Amino acid sequence: MPKNVHIKCPESIEGVKALADYKNIIKQLLFFNVPPKDETFILKERESEIKELQSEEEEQQPKKRREKGKIRKITNPCCDNNTGKEGNGGNGGEEDKQNQGAKSPTEVSKKLSDNLEYMKKIYSIPTNGDMVLREFDIVVKNEVIPAFMIFFDGMTDRKVINDNIMQPLMLLSNLDIKSDEQDVESFVKDHILPHCQLKVEKKYRSIIDEVNFGGCALFIDGVETSFVADVKGWEHRGVERPNTELVLRGPQEGFGELLRVNTALVRKTLKDEDLIVENISIGRRSKTPCSMLYIKDIANDDLVDEVRRRLKSIDVDYIYDSGQLEQMIEDCALVPAPQILATERPDRVATLLTDGKVAVMIHGNPFVLVMPATFPELLTSPEDTYVRFPYGNFLRIIRGIGIAFALLLPGIYVAVTNFHHEMIPTDLILAIAASREKVPFPSVVEILIMELAFELIREAGIRIPGPIGPTLGIVGALILGQAAVAANIVSPILIIVVAVTGIGSFAIPNFALGFAFRILRFGYIFLGAMAGFLGITTGLFLHGLWLVSAKSYGVPFMSPLAPKVRVGGYENLLARAPIWKQEVRPDYLNPKDTRRQPKISRGWVQKKEGEDGNGGKQD
Amino acid sequence: MRKLICIFLIVSILCGLLSGCYDRREVDELAYVLAIGLDKGKTNKLKITLQIAVPMAIGGGGEGGGDAEKASTIVTLESASMYAGLDLANNFVSKQLNLSHAKVLVVSKELAQEGGIEGFMMALPRGREIRPNMFIAVSRQSAEEYIRAVKPVLEVNPAKFYELNFRAYRYTGFTANTDLHDFYLKMKSLYSQPVAILAGVGRFDEGQEFDVKGSTFDEKNRSIPLEGDFVAGEITKSGGVKAEIMGLAVFDGAKMVGELDGEATMYYLMIQGDFNNSYMTMHDPLQKDKLVILNIKRSRNPKRDVKMINGKPVIDVKIRLEADIQVLQSGINYEMPQNLVILEKAYEDFIKEGMKRLLYLTSQEYNTDIFGFGERVKQQFITWGEWEKYGWLKKYKDSTFNVDVDLKIRRPGLTIRSSPIQYSNGEGAQ
Amino acid sequence: MAMAENKIKFGKWEASALIITLIITQLILGFPRLMVETAGTAGWIVVLYVTILALLAFFIIEKLYSSFKGKDLLDISERIGGSILRILVGIIFLAYFIFIISIVLRSFAENMKVITLQQSPISYVTMFFIIGMIAGAYAGIEALVRFCAIVMPIILAGLLLIFIAVSPHFNFENIFPILGTGPIDIFGKGFLRVSVFSAISLLFFITPFIKTHKSFRTVGYVSIGVSAAFFFVGTFAYLLVYPFPIGVEGFLPVYQLSRLVEYGRFFQRIESVFVLIWAASALIYLSSVFYFIVYVFKKTFKLEYYKPLILPFAILIFNISLIPPNLVTAVELESKYIRTYVWIISFVIPIVILVTAKYFKRGTNKEEKKNA
């Protein structure tokens, strides 16, 4: 008996604990919790009157913050300038590294052997196979000085190293150079090394960072600094056609994996000296180089500051992909749509930049993030503006229908066939009834099976090795559908519904938005099965509220639809006006320069002053 | 935000558990009634005939068309009311009966004359399933006979047969659009009375059996029946579908009081302003043994006016029509403007005579204002109370009518000048 | 939170969209029938008359309001009568909102049940509206007005489409006799029908969000004007299709109109699509009014948060809505009491408060200074 009690006791305690847990969960779910006082970013109006209204305090605060950030940037490149407690919390790893540095030397030593030893330790030479450490001698003023250089094989351009660094150091140093420079460091820098991108670094940390990113470090005995040459030269994909946003009319080049190439592609399209490319590196360990692009005299300063603030506050060890970065800097993870636009097209980035947006590029990724993004923008394709405006509008209408199908068609099918029989024309309802006669499942299950199968085919089609992919698509679409109908598992009309839904979802220009719709589609199926059109309307209401209350970098996600903005945005929103009518930039971005073009941008439609009727002809 | 989602999830799960989806009915779990027939019952108040679609025979499951014979099944049962009948029927029809695709309500003449559709009509606005655009027809035989005679030849689906057949008035003018909504409004209104399509089952199986006993040509002093001198079931035809529609059943409230033949129906449509176009045959005004056929169209809406003289209504009707010449058997040169006038005049008189016959028939014999002349009287009142007290429907029987028909022949068709057929004995020469 | 709420601001378009959607709901709930019941064939005259009355009342209110820019009714009543009057006014409006939302919730659910979900229990149908209400209140006024701004044109277009599509059934003789059941009915009984514009009273609570008096004025006139136009078109269409004595029979006029739409063999039976418009406007109406219930409660009792109030109030409203034993009682309650007397709350009380504030307590600017 006592044993029994003994055994029971902890169980009941655990039970109580578990109960308490549930209680907490229920409490959290059902009862009110005081909302955390989050700092929410609101893109402020550009108007001067509002700025005047702002109290001085408010104006000073952001300045302080920025200054703080600057100070820290020197000591700690990825600091969190949000609060004052970054030292102990998120940046523990960084401190550890620095502590290590305190024990071992942090700066380049005068003795070459120390440097050599340190480098060997850091890079685990000779375990590290692709690390090249080359020792050699150079001659300075008839003096033989030992030196070594270190770089990663494969990440550097060997020809450049041979021609521009090794050759001059080993051969040219023997030449008689007319100079009375005595200092070895400045002699080497000024006379011997002809390489153009050369940095003189003292700290091991920055030297290592450079080497990690395709640099070549040169250590010379008796010199307290190291020469770091930028000799990046790794293999990469060239500028190719973009894979996701294809257009028939318009430029066919897409971003590649190289940051500098990508920035160059944008600069090439957007020849403007006001285009700023700010470098920021993200990731404590990976130090992934990123660039933030904006046009200085168009983009709203607050917006630029906010993007910079968010980027700098990110504290992770590795980041590789713009998709990861997107998740780190988007406003709300739960909104069923991407709040940042990812694009592969330089022309699109350029267009959006001229609207006053900010773009973020990350090294090693062809997708560029543009923010803020609004819902209507996600539904447009760059081609809309490249073709003449009636065609562009036609494309948009077709796309709109496709999107509606992708989101609602299965749900509406279920709602109509289960609740609103009177809605279907008699001939059609009899056809549906006949085709469903031998199907054993209720139509909800039927449509779920088919949608699931469709999603499976889609996923498998992407993951499957190259040449089999299309085959699988055909097998899936034709044979599976045909066989399912023949086996009376689904009705033929349902195959049409699922197929149209699938095609509709491919018409969504933004892949990420397509994802959101594909998932929500299932919600609408359930709602349709629960209460017909009432369920679907409730779903649309909740979905709408959700989207409408979302914000992307202080810009309401549904603008310019709601809130309606006074000017701009409408010319190129649902229907597209002719290009010469698109005179102002979208107001919701509060750009510094609101006008794109004057009221009359096509000068030829107006007769010049002093010209008579024939004047036009003579021109 | 997160809480919002949590609550939404919880509630939707609750709903899902709660629901069991009360109203969910799969398409294939329902039986679709295409036609409802009401007769006087032998053992009970009503005999109900339901024509139920058989989807497998209509949809065919992709084998390219079904079998018209098997496209529907017809059940007949007797019960106290229509909904009671549906309940009863579900004991032997495996699927739940659904009226939302019912196209036509057929009532037998016998039942209609006794006002037997009153109960059904009163139930109409409450029932969500019954469509307001369902046709209403009165069968001269029993409704069951009529529905059983519907064996579409050109269509597989009987629903399509009804929809197309009952809309034929647009180009024949021999029936009218009498949907349930219209019928209901007129039945309850203070200024108009309803009509219903007259349906019937053809009497003849073969050509030898033909007779014209049922035709109305005798009453109109005609030597032969013209195309409008028939009512449903009396058309001299064989083959095809035995179910016919022609003419109208005239109602007083919910009671049927009389029938109109095809020609009268055409005039009814003209006075109502619903006339579209149709052919009209007449004896040649100059050569009585030959026929002329015009294709008549409505050119303007009719003008209708009611004046009260000595407390009795005097009703003016002005009809404006236009026509194309279709056939001139005599070969007389009616295309010439001076001859055209003769033809126009003859037609005007012909139509005027028929219209007067119809108007006095409704006012003196049937005593029911199916044309809605009351609408014009209503305008003369300021408030509803006065109008209600006036009691137009009682006063209609004392009406006198002035009919004015204006017919203009616009086009002679492809022929601009007729010439007679020449015979070797010189006949036909003018 | 209180700070954040004051930052919320929306434009004229959003505010008008909200008020129009709220008023238009009456059209869907049976306003045309009510008009026909009031004055028979002259129902359309009642609409015009009532519109003029509403515009007149709003004109007075708007003139009086000019000196209270950006203040809602509660602020003003606090200014003249301190906390006591504020709480009193708050409670009057709360009671009115709660009563009306419960009845409307019930009618919406009952109507939905009649139209499509006959077998489902009323609580199940109500659940959908309650979910919408709660979600709307959580999302807040900003999200609601934005949603309105998108959906309002769609709702209006849908209604207009029904009215146009049903035009083949129009019979213009139906408006005679021109004065219907008599001028006493039109101008006497009709006067009480000014209550259809009672949703305008919410405008007196969103003033802090729309800031300027100019936009207050525009929003008021525009929303009364637009909704009156739709009331007129709706009543007229209903009257032309369903003549007087029969028009009183059905209790969902717009639904009955949509049932008649028919173009050929294929384009018919569109009334289920109407359910979409109908449920959307129901959800907006319920969630907006519900938001204002918790908002007014919060403001009346100077609470810091409104979100904890949402669930208790939702449950309260759900329960109140289930009190009427049947649909007829609910419709009766609505038309006999609410639609007859609410004009006192939505027009008379604001006028009284504003007049007192303007002419009797002009000197005391203490509160104003405090607020500033």
Image (spheres, coloured by chain):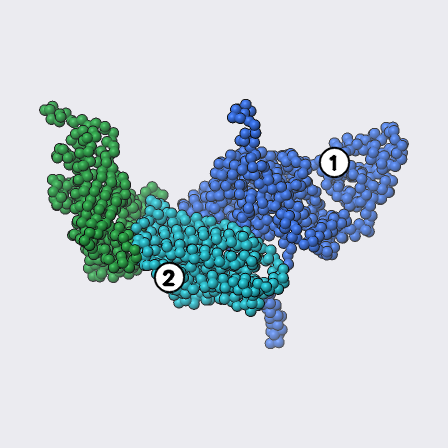
Q: Residue furthest bottom?
A: A1
Local SS, label 1: loop
Give percent across and percent down for residue A25.
58, 63
Q: Colour of chain B?
A: green
Same-chain check, marks 2 and 1: no
Colour that chain A carries in the picture: blue
> Relative to residue A243, is residue B32 depicted above or below?
below
Residue C167 visible here: yes
Question: Residue A478 shows which numbered tag?
Answer: none
Q: Quadrant of residue B160?
A: top left
Q: Among the chains, which one is cyan?
A: C
Residue type at the position of mark 2: Gly
Q: Amino acid at mark 1?
A: Val
Label 1 Cα crowd, 10 Å radius (few <14 / some 14-19 / many 20+): many
Residue C141, horizontal then vertical, whole percent: 54, 56
**The C terminus of chain C appears in which quarter of the rendering?**
bottom right
Quarter of the image for residue C42 reads bottom left
Residue under circle 1? A231
Along the line of sight, the residue nearer the viewer: A95 or B233: B233
Q: Which mark is residue C188?
A: 2
Residue at the spot 84% in from the left edge and 35% down from the top edge: A188
Name the side, left or right, on which B357 lies relative to C28.
left
Q: Is residue A488 visible?
A: no
Tell us which disc is closer to us: 2 or 1: 2
Q: Measured from the top left, where is residue B12 in percent x and y?
A: 49, 59
Q: Which of the chains bears the disc numbered 1? A: A
Q: How far, Cα to Cα, is label 2 from label 1?
A: 93 Å
Asked if the residue under mark 1 is in contact with the one under mark 2, i.e. CB atoms within 8 Å, the reply is no
B66 relative position to C68: left or right: left
Residue beneath the point at 39% across and 64% down:
C336
